[in-house]
Image (cartoon, rainbow, N blue to C red):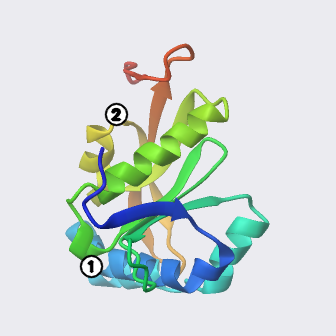
Amino acid sequence: MSLPPGLIIRAGTPGDAAFIQRVHEEAIRGLGPRAYSRAQVESWASGLTPDGYVRAMNQAGERFLLAEPATGGGRLASFCSFAGNRIVGLYTHPQWAGRGVGGALLGRAEAAIVADGHERIGITATLGGRAFYEKHGYRVIQARDSRTRGGLFVAVLEMEKRFTEASGHATSFPLS
């Protein structure tokens, strides 16, 4: 999927942590109410700090891809983070939602994960993200409840996408 004009994708660094936090919170608060109550959204958005992203990068080996205006300025359109064979987070600022930014970041992250030798990619998706991930070849494995940082529970979906070893293309497998 192509990136909207005027945006670039680059690797995130610890110096980007405050900008990542801002787009994370704005995405949760702006898009979260499509699937969750206001209390659940606020519980989900609570507790985010720049230090958390720095720890994820430096200690957990999480890699971040950022989409931002080519002119810079610290305003991110979206970010995608991943570690091992999992997409850890994909958040898009509401003003950029539905414009291909998330799909472009997801595609780049998937390519990196497959290049690292993984044949499956997993994600814990929100109910609001289901259609997006299904459009990109993911299948629901199971539904479950997840505790937010603020302590409330929200329904989430464990989803997976498999790739054939030889081609790197997604394949469809029946759910069992």
Which quarter of the picture shows residue 92? Answer: bottom left
Amino acid under disc 2: Gly
Q: Relative to 60, is 34 on the left or the right? A: left
Which residue type does callout 1 highlight? Gly
Where 60 sits versus 21, above or below? above
| Front position in the image: 43 or 60 | 60
Residue 164 coordinates in the image, percent (x, y): 50, 17
Residue at left 49%, top 86%? 46
In space, the residues marked 1 and 2 are separated at their CA atoms by 25 Å
Which quadrant of the figure has residue 115?
top right
Q: Secondary structure at mark 1?
A: helix
Of all residues, the one furthest to the front in this rendering is 71
- Quarter of the rendering containing residue 44: bottom left
Q: Which mark is residue 137?
A: 2
Residue 169, horizontal then vertical, whole percent: 43, 23
Q: Is residue 120 above or below residue 57?
A: above
The image position of residue 37, as x and y in percent, is 27, 77
Give the residue number, with chain letter if any, for mark 1.
30
**What residue appears at the point 59 percent right and 86 percent down from the top-left corner?**
49
Quarter of the rendering occupied by the N terminus? top left
What residue lies at 45% left-to-right and 60% top-to-bottom?
Answer: 9
Decide: few, some or many residues near mark 1? Use Cα within 10 Å; few <14, some 14-19, many ≥20: some
Position of 45 with respect to 121 (left or right) is left
